[in-house]
Amino acid sequence: MGEPELPAAGRPQPRRAAADEGRQGGRLRRAARRSAMPLLAAATGALPVLVFPTVGWWWFAYVCLVPLLLVLRAAPTGRRAAKLGWYGGIGFLIGVMSWLIPTLSVFIVILAALLGLFWGPWGWLVWRTLHGRPDAWRALAAVVLVPSGWMVIETIRSWQYLGGPWGLLGASQYQQHPALVLASVGGVWLDSLFIVAVNTAVVVLIGTWGRSFVAYGTLAALVAVTAAVCAWAPQPRLTGATTSIGVVQPGGSANEADRTARGEKLTLGLAPLRPDLVVWGESSLDYDLTTNPGLTGQLAVVSRQVGADLLVNVDAARPGTGPDGGGIYKSSVLVGPNGLTGQRYDKIRLVPFGEYIPLRPVLGWIADFSKAAGVDRRRGKAPVVMTVPEPGGRTLRIGPLICFESAFPDMSRELVRLGAQVVVVQSSTSTFQDTAAPEQHASLAALRAAESGRSVVQATLTGVSVAYGPTGHRIGRMLGTDDRGTTVYTVPLATGTTLYVRWGNWVPTLCCLLVALTALCWSLLAWKRRRDTAATA
């Protein structure tokens, strides 16, 4: 006897079941893609870490943003692209600031998440100009606006209270002559703008299957303009005179007296070389010299025996009350054969969450989980140019910077405008000794030299100590993090001013104005479309 026939509603529906399974599988795949895209954006955002020391793939800078740009342009909506831009920014910051991980541990993720918000609008901008297959006008807008938008990010996060200009893309080119010439024209900012423009043009080529004349034209124009600038840009004029600066790198020590004794012994070893100036690293002394005549007398004796002034660095409490006294300062102090010369520079730009904690009454607990200073350092008021006597009755004018300050292009520029013939950086990266920080920090001196048209000498406690000439090319041997000892750099003196010294931060200023004007125009167009739609409804 056969089975009863099922009604139509109860019969198996293999096609419908397969379709349901297909739709469910599609939803699962889309969900998997949605969850994977943030990780992909963060991973591609971190790729620029490869262009900085210690990896140092400088050439990779010109395509390092291409994967992230492709992720952003493939987003389904502008809002989604903004979110992916935020993830890309997190990856970028964790990558270039990875040397902070041993100090901040998990808090680096929180810091990156906050600063990474600046990449959100940039992600939308990338999608707006590059999604789909951009026509000629959109392609042209992309190669102008995407690099300008990146410059807005670099400008905002370079504010000293947000951490300062570390990891600027242009800084990766510190060994390339064309990039150093560009820096003399527009600072490290012009190098960053050039790099992002090349990355954007490559993405336009990919998005148009290699048929975009705008992208080809942009790449050709970038090369041609760079060549023209390198041939035309005025460079500092070497006077033929030189000065010799001895650098003392004693190595780290928890015992201040031992560190001072080693510094004195190493300095005395420079006596046969007769340098014009001897420079010690940051925080080389833990005592205020105005209240410690014994230590000041020791240094004066060393100065007499070597035949040169000593530029030491003091990290100590200073007596006094009121706005000009009291508290702990980091100071460059010049000591001569007769003791203190009266020339001192107090550090102006302090490291947030390092040398001070913003809103300490609220955020002071961070000191318990990091190596932030237990007591906030006080800020200096103005840059200082010091006068150092040289043989034959001549004088040398030096502009001191302290560690973190060498990351700021405007600080060395201001010292040159005040008459500095040589910029001297006193640094200590001993906290980050086994990370990429010492080499990355030392590389910044090359950019500062090229921008300012003056030699830059960096002296550190534990490395890297280095010197660069007025065009940004390295002079003499570098003292690495494994070195302990001294070296003397004979650096050339130059006159004249670079275009960057004359014009300042014109590149980020123009980029910010361009992005702001574009945002205003787009907002007005969107408002007009909404008004017209409402009028016709």
Image (cartoon, rainbow, N blue to C red):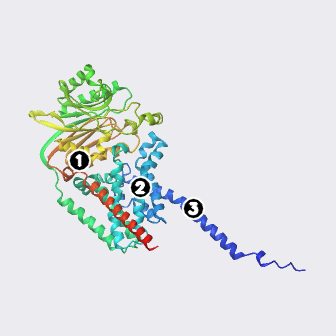
Q: CA distance from mark 2 to mark 1?
A: 30 Å
Give the residue drawn at x 21%, y 42%: 415
Under circle 1, the secondary element is helix
3 and 1 marks in contact (CB < 8 Å): no
Residue 203 in which image quadrant: bottom left
In-image side of 54 versus 414 (left or right):
right
2 and 1 marks in contact (CB < 8 Å): no
Residue tagged 2 = 119
Of residue 535 and residue 504, the one placed in the foreground of this image is 535
Of residue 518 and residue 477, the one placed in the foreground of this image is 518
Under circle 3, the secondary element is helix
Residue 291 in which image quadrant: top left
Residue tagged 1 = 449
Instruction: Name the mark nearer the viewer: 2 or 1.
Output: 2
Q: Please, what is the three-letter code of the amino acid marked with disc 3?
A: Ala
Label 2 vs 3, first from the N-terminus: 3
Give the residue drawn at x 22%, y 46%: 413
Q: CA distance from mark 2 to mark 3?
A: 24 Å
Residue tagged 3 = 32
* Disc 3 packing (10 Å; few <14; some 14–19; many ≥20): few
Instruction: Name the mark nearer the viewer: 2 or 3.
Output: 2
Residue farthest along the top direction in this orientation: 294
Q: CA distance from mark 3 to mark 1?
A: 49 Å
Label 3 vs 1, first from the N-terminus: 3
